[in-house]
C-alpha cells in the first residue's frame, strides 16, 4: 500500500509529495521546498517515519516544482529523474525564477531520464509513466492502478487545466493528451494535483469546462 504525504510549499503554494510503502523506501515527487522551515519539516517527516529516500521524480521542471531539488539531492544523495524534453527548464532554473521575481540557485542536470511506458519503482511499488505534454514539453504523470491514483502535476486541476503560455506550452496538445491518455483511465482514479485540492478523473471528464 502506497502512502501519499502532501506538503503545500513555497510562495506559489505548490503541492510537493513524498510517496512511501511498507518497505520504508520513498520517493519525492516535485520537491518545491523553498523556506528553511519547509526543509525542517521534510527532515522531520523522513526521520520520524524511518523512511529511506531513493529518488526524486518530477512531473515537470517548472521552477516552482524544482525549488527543493538541490536540498533533497544534498540531504539524501539521491538522483533526479525527469523527462528529457524538460531538461531545458533545469538549465534555465535561475532565469525561470527571475521571470517571476524569485532568486533561484542553479540546479544540476537531470540524473536519470525516463520516458512514457517506463516505470518509477521504490520498495514493492511502481508508478507507470504517462507523457502528457502541453503545460510543458516533458510533462508526465505517474499512475498506479493498484492504489487507483495519479500524480498529475500541473496537467489537470479541480475544474481547470494547466497554463500553456510558457515556452514549450501548447493548449490543444494539452487538451488532446488529457482526453486521449488520462480520460481512458478509470473515472474513480484520484488525481493529486500540482496546486490546489485533489480531484477525480470521472468528475473532470463530465464537469471540467475546459474539457467538455
Image (spheres, rainbow, N blue to C red):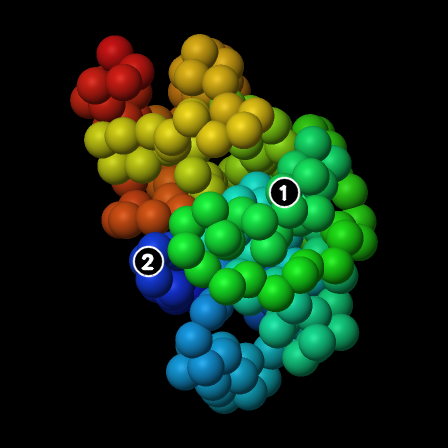
Q: Is residue 25 visible?
A: no
Q: Is residue 108 visible?
A: yes
- Classify 10 Å Cα crowding around label 2: few (below 14), some (14-19), many (20 and above): some
- Classify 10 Å Cα crowding around label 1: few (below 14), some (14-19), many (20 and above): many
Front of the two marks 1 and 2: 1
Image quadrant where residue 210 sits: top left
Question: Quick one: label 1 or label 2, which is nearer the N terminus?
Answer: 2
Task: Relative to 21, say whether 30 is above or below.
Answer: above
Which residue does the image show at 46% across and 46% down from the upper left? 99
Q: Which residue is labeled 1 in the image?
A: 89
Q: Viewed as shown, does residue 127 lie left or right of 172?
A: right
The image shows residue 147 at horizontal and vertical percentages of 47, 47
Q: Which residue is labeled 2 in the image?
A: 13
Element type at mark 2: loop
The quadrant the C terminus occupies is top left
Which residue does the image show at 26% across and 49% down from the upper left? 197
Which residue is more in the foreground, 67 or 76? Answer: 67
Image quadrant where residue 113 sits: top right
Image quadrant where residue 82 sits: top right
Which residue does the image show at 34% across and 55% down from the upper left? 12
Which residue is more in the foreground, 112 or 46? Answer: 112
Task: Relative to 26, say whether 180 is above or below.
Answer: above
Task: Relative to 148, say whether 66 is above or below.
Answer: below
Element type at mark 1: helix
Which residue is more in the foreground, 80 or 186? Answer: 80
The image shows residue 28 at horizontal and vertical percentages of 58, 62
Callout count: 2
Question: Alpha carbon of mark 1 to alpha carbon of mark 2: how far?
Answer: 20 Å
Which residue does the image show at 25% across and 37% down from the upper left? 158
Q: Viewed as shown, does residue 122 lie left or right of 15?
A: right
Amino acid at each position: 500500500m502506497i502512502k501519499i504525504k502532501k506538503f503545500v510549499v513555497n510562495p506559489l503554494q505548490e503541492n510537493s509529495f513524498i510517496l512511501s510503502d511498507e518497505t520504508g523506501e520513498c520517493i519525492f515527487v516535485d520537491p518545491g521546498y523553498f523556506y528553511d522551515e519547509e526543509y525542517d519539516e521534510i527532515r522531520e517527516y523522513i526521520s520520524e517515519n524511518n523512511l529511506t529516500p531513493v529518488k526524486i521524480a518530477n512531473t515537470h521542471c517548472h521552477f516552482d516544482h524544482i525549488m527543493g531539488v538541490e536540498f533533497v539531492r544534498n540531504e539524501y544523495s539521491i538522483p533526479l529523474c525527469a523527462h528529457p524534453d524538460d531538461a531545458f527548464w533545469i538549465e534555465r532554473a535561475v532565469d525561470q525564477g527571475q521571470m517571476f521575481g524569485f532568486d533561484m540557485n542553479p540546479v544540476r542536470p537531470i540524473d536519470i531520464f525516463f520516458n512514457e511506458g517506463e516505470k518509477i519503482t521504490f520498495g514493492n511499488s511502481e508508478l507507470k509513466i504517462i507523457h502528457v505534454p502541453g503545460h510543458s514539453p516533458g510533462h508526465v504523470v505517474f499512475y498506479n492502478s493498484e492504489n487507483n491514483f495519479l500524480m498529475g502535476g500541473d496537467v489537470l486541476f479541480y475544474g481547470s487545466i494547466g497554463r500553456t503560455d510558457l515556452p514549450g506550452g501548447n493548449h490543444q496538445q494539452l487538451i488532446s493528451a488529457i482526453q486521449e491518455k488520462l480520460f481512458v483511465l478509470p473515472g474513480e482514479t484520484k488525481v493529486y494535483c500540482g496546486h490546489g485540492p485533489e480531484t477525480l478523473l470521472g468528475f473532470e471528464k463530465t464537469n471540467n469546462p475546459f474539457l467538455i
